[in-house]
Image (spheres, rainbow, N blue to C red):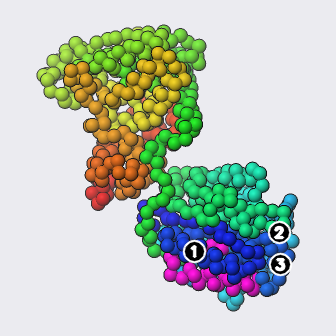
Amino acid sequence: MRDGFIKVAAASPKLEVANCGYNSDNIISAIDKAHKEGVSVIVFPELCITSYSCDDLFKQDVLLNAAYSSLLKICASTKGREMVAVVGLPVNSNGLLYNCAAVLCDGAILGIVPKSYIPTYSEFYEKRHFKEAPKDNTETDILGIKIPFGTNILFECRETKELVLAVEICEDLFATISPSSYHTLNGATVIANLSASDEVLGKAGYRRSLTESQSGKCICAYIYSNANPSESTTDVVFSGHSIIAENGVILAESKPFGPEYTVTDIDLQRLVNDRRNQTSVREINKDREYIHISFSLKEKKTELIRKISSHPFIPEDTEKLIERCNDIFDIQCTGLKKRMEHSKSRTAVIGISGGLDSTLTLLVTYRAFEMMGKQAKDIICISMPCFGTTKRTKDNAKKLSELLNTDSRVIDISKAVKGHLKDIGHSGLEYDAAYENAQARERTQVLMDVANMTGGIVIGTGDLSEIALGWCTYNGDHMSMYAVNTSVPKTLIQYIVRNVADYRGGELRKVLYDILDTPISPELIPADDGEIVQKTEDIVGPYELHDFFLYHFMRWGSGPMKIFRLTKYAFQGKYTDEQIKKWLTVFYKRFFVSQFKRSCSPNGPKVGSVALSPRGDWRMPSDASVAEWLSEIEKI
């Protein structure tokens, strides 16, 4: 396992009903294919050695003995393969017949897991042949070999502690409380489901929703392998619909009547990290006694095949993106509405710069005022040009404020800042931190004082990306009475603004699109012939990289080496290794040194799973050392 990734597969090969020799050959061929691709866990359909459709033939010793012999043949094929294979067959134990899964590794049968829930409705009548799993684990005999037998078995990898496999069979997933719920409470991270679910209208969607939901609730990987169309007989048709899901997301799928083989990577580190953060899955369930069977798998260095999104905050599907933008906008507006009403504020005061963040803040405030039935004239938009302000941003700020019929004001702070710099003994010629921050703090002072004069509150403009990097002036734009963008990343803000622009249309759309096309800048350094010279991304790095780093660092607890590897996969050569390493170093240094700013950040609405509020989302010592993270970067 490298960086927590292992390859897993769901295979649904062609079968012949009751022909164990033919079926075992096809199963072994699939195992051979998986071995060549570096697969660590492969799952086959329910009763695949005999086929599911044998009906009363299951009562024939000839079939049962052939199934046992074929199991040993398949088991032998796993010798030296560094792979776990899970296959289905009928097992006669203590005089009763069970629908079972056999877990195989390195030429050995690790355990036999019987099916817990036996369906007896509509086209299913398994109780005619099979007994439900016994409550307690026992042993069973397969051609003289004693093997652990029961549902409460965890198969644990010695080398990769995060890999803990458990098994359930078909109907077990459809039950009110699935066995996998107990398995994951007791430590299983990967669930194998061997299934023979026939194809009827609407059932494929139901399978998807079940696997998504169960993998999400249990914070696990779920490998669902379904019977091949070759098993279709009499009144039922099978489709080979197989699914691999991870923590509520389908990673790979063989759609109905599609390919016979599905493979992808699962991220065990991601699952384990998420479980550490979820208190509801921390406590081990004591109602069941589990046996733990260990196996050995050496690390396989394979290339990732799962898709790594370069913009994890932005859905690739257009409809989902629009839905996300609308949802975030509604959350922001509702949060601000509540704060305005609770504080009995008459006005909302915004520092409007002509940039993306203040634009979204104004759009949110305008909509919140519509929701409250308040006049837009009570939104006080203050443009505060100074040394670095360009005509383009100044004009856009003015146009935007006027198009929305707000109380639009221009207060030039140049004179005040020059006076302040003189008072503190600054030459005004050195473009240092004091030169820049004096402007930011003067703007905040103006906003706060106007809010006091008009019975209002200052609405913050800073976004999640800036807060993560500390790209704000302490007690300057760092501070407000309510920060509506506080958990919205920079890469997503542009889409929310564009979504509003397209919805509102007209002249407002033109202005918003010009703002979207303006380089991101704090405009604190004098312009060069009216053009912006201070571009944020030239200083701190591309926001798309920082948002990518932030997502994997915060959401999944990934370390620098893993993030570096994921970045290379996600951006596919857009950035060199040196560039990624440079900006990753910048990210960690700025993130750690800026915690003191986040520790006293203002209230703002949480909109997603990645947020930095010190009250509910991220608690970190302000003086924590970044040394260990930088040390790992140096090893890249």
Instruction: Count residues near mark 1 (Cα–Cα under 10 Å), then give few for <14, some for 14-19, many for 20+.
Output: many
The residues colored magenta run: 64-87
Q: Quadrant of the N terminus?
A: bottom left
In the image, residue 187 sits, relative to residue 369, either above or below, namely below
Give residue 57's mark: 3
Whether 68 is among the magenta residues is yes
The percent position of residue 473, horizontal first and vertical second, equals 31, 29
Of mark 3 and mark 1, the one earlier in the sequence is: 1
Give the residue pinned by disc 1: 31
Q: Quadrant of the C terminus?
A: bottom left
Give the left or right position of residue 121, taking residue 82 as reference.
Answer: right
Determine the CA span between mark 3 and mark 1. 27 Å
Do the residues bearing badges 1 and 2 touch, measured as CB atoms within 8 Å? no
Determine the CA span between mark 1 and mark 2. 28 Å
Asked which secondary structure carries label 2, the reply is helix
- Which numbered disc, 3 or 2, marks the residue closer to the eye? 3
The percent position of residue 338, horizontal first and vertical second, equals 56, 23
The percent position of residue 244, horizontal first and vertical second, equals 60, 59
How many tags in the picture? 3
Q: Amino acid at mark 3?
A: Leu
Instruction: Count residues near mark 2 (Cα–Cα under 10 Å), then give few for <14, some for 14-19, many for 20+.
Output: some
Asked which secondary structure carries label 3, the reply is helix
Q: Amino acid at mark 1?
A: Ile
Q: Residue at x 53, y 10 (%)?
A: 375
Quadrant housing residue 72:
bottom right
- Which numbered disc, 1 or 2, marks the residue closer to the eye? 1
